């Protein structure tokens, strides 16, 4: 994924955007037939299916939430890597229910957002030691969450547009 440097630098903007992502994703997936959720996408989304998106964002949210909790609980603690670009294996998500995935992502995101609502300006600059990137701040993580949401919302829209084009033929 490509991240725009400094996109969403204002914590108030980030909190609003992060808080809206779960609902946006749920609306995007409403009413899509199961067989279409499991269909593999073509270029530029090869390796993905629509069902992989909510699975992936849920897994990323779990990891990011752990990063935030670790940073906010102690000064400059080590945090685990969360691979924002990981394409999930089909066998990991194929039996999942899309509504349950979306509901869990929405719940986890709400917890992450509440965690961020409770911090002050200094806490946004607190850092954790990432194993590959070095010091990473709460603000950087929130900004990357925002960019990650946008990437996957656009990906879902692109894949749904391709689905509609196939159906129209």
Image (cartoon, rainbow, N blue to C red):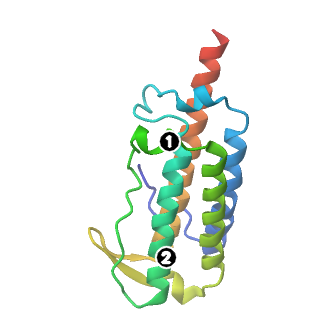
Tell me the number on the disc at residue 52: 1
Q: For mark 1, does the 10 Å Cα neighbourhood hold few (<14), some (14 to 19), or many (20 or more) residues?
A: many
95 versus 72 height, above or below:
above
Q: Is residue 49 left or right of residue 22?
A: left
Residue at 45% over, 66% down: 63
Residue at 43% over, 45% down: 92
- Where is residue 30 shown, x and y percent of the image? 72, 39
Q: Nearer the viewer, residue 162 or 92?
A: 92
Tell which circle, 2 or 1, labels the residue nearer the N-terminal end: 1
Cα–Cα gap, marks 2 and 1 = 24 Å
Residue at the outermost left position: 132
**Among the 4 quarters of the image, the one containing residue 84:** bottom left
Determine the secondary structure under disc 2. helix
Q: Which residue was labeled with disc 2?
A: 68
- State if disc 1 and disc 2 touch (CB < 8 Å): no
Residue at 56% over, 31% down: 159
């Amino acid at each position: 994924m490509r991240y725009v440097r400094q996109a969403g630098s204002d914590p108030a903007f980030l909190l609003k955007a992060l808080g809206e992502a779960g609902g946006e994703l749920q609306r995007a997936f409403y009413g899509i037939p199961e067989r279409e959720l499991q269909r593999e996408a073509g270029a530029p989304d090869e390796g993905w299916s629509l069902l992989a998106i909510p699975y992936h964002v849920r897994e990323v949210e779990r990891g990011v939430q752990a990063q935030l909790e670790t940073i906010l609980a102690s000064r400059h603690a080590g945090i685990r890597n969360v691979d924002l670009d990981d394409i999930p294996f089909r066998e990991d998500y194929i039996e999942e229910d899309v509504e349950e995935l979306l509901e869990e992502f929405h719940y986890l995101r709400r917890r992450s957002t509440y965690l961020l609502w409770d911090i002050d300006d200094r806490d946004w600059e607190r850092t954790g030691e990432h194993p590959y990137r070095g010091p990473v701040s709460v603000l950087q993580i929130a900004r990357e969450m925002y960019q990650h949401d946008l990437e996957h919302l656009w990906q879902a829209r692109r894949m749904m547009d391709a689905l509609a084009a196939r159906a129209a033929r």
